[in-house]
Amino acid sequence: MDPQHLSATLKTAGRAARDINLRPYETSGAEQVQSGLVPLVRRALDVGVDALSAVLTHYDVKGEPPPEVADLSFMARLELLAHQQQLDGLQLAVDAVQLVSECGSSKRSLLRSTFAVDRALCLLEGLRFEGGDLGAFELQLGLRVRAEYAKFRKELLVLGQPELTNVATHLERAGKRITGLIGGDLFDEFRLDDRLMMHRLLGRIQAWLDGTDGRDTKSGLRLWQDLSGFVSLLVQVNHRTELVEHDRTVVRDALDKLFGGKPRTSVPPDVWAQLEKLYGRDDGVDGMLDAGLGQFAVEWREPLERLEASLGLKPGQEQDPEGI
């Protein structure tokens, strides 16, 4: 098989992964997941393994140093085979969440593997690579997800702890907001565990509002506490490596451009555009941006120095586990 056909098979495997839709199965039982989703994922993994095996066979020539694409194919193939074994081991599983989680992990691995190998192959052979920059694409999605998480967190926590007389109002607002998130275009990009938790919390909220669990005020307060705890944990999206590296670059560049040379009065448009992407990293910065503040350079010194410390950019400064 020539390199052009090898590239085409890798793209076919990537499309097979992208075509897998997890959302319909996130609220399904284990039997539905086993009969519907798992076969789709298994077939996609088979396509991926076959494509990677073909690449490995083509480039792994005895007596010659293997090119990078061969090494990538070898490692990627092992990763997909491991996912196949994991799915086989879950054949008798009754935990739908575990099944959907493994299917989601398999889908991501297949996408990343075929993309990386196809890019290396096209670079080696001088072929046109039409996949774009997956890293940049994932970063932009990560920034959007973080901003959405931050808005969701703020909208719920700003309500405060409900009183005995307004538990229903608080839960109704939360239910409407979660329903909006689940129906939104960005929902599929949320962490799978977060999506599953939102489904479960929405189900509990609806059951409480419908009275099917007795609509006891104390149970409503406990439900709100569980919801608040979950929402607070969404800040952990900041642990993502691509977001940490992005934020370090933005903070470092902003400090240099605003305070490293000639004093500035206002924030240049290009710097402002980057600072806006920090939304969700720090509550203080989020508050500034929400209030329309931050047009003047002096307003950013303290927030940026705080972020500089929490992101571990100061020499000898320990990273703040809550900041990352």
Image (spheres, grey):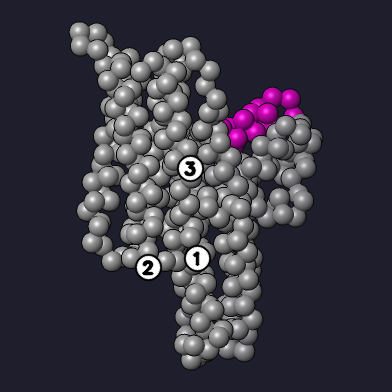
Position of 111 relative to 196 (above/below): above
Residue under label 1: 198
Determine the main secondary structure of the stretch shown in magenta.
helix
> Looking at the rendering, which quadrant does residue 43 occupy?
top left
Q: For this rendering, which residue is in front, 49 or 188?
A: 49
Q: Residues within 10 Å of mark 3 (few under 14, many from 20)?
A: some
Could you tell me if residue 146 is visible in this image?
Answer: no
Residue reaching furthest left? 63
Q: Residues within 10 Å of mark 1 (few under 14, many from 20)?
A: many
Residue drawn at x 74%, y 45% is 294
Badge nearest the viewer, 2 or 1 = 2
Q: Earlier in the sequence, mark 3 or mark 2?
A: 3
Residue under label 2: 29
Looking at the rendered structure, the secondary structure element under dot 3 is helix
On residue 18, the disc is 3
Q: Which residues are magenta?
A: 249-263
Residue 102 position, x and y percent, is 34, 52
Residue drawn at x 64%, y 81% is 169
Task: Find out whether residue 89 is within the magenta segment.
Answer: no
Amino acid type for the residue under numbered disc 3: Arg
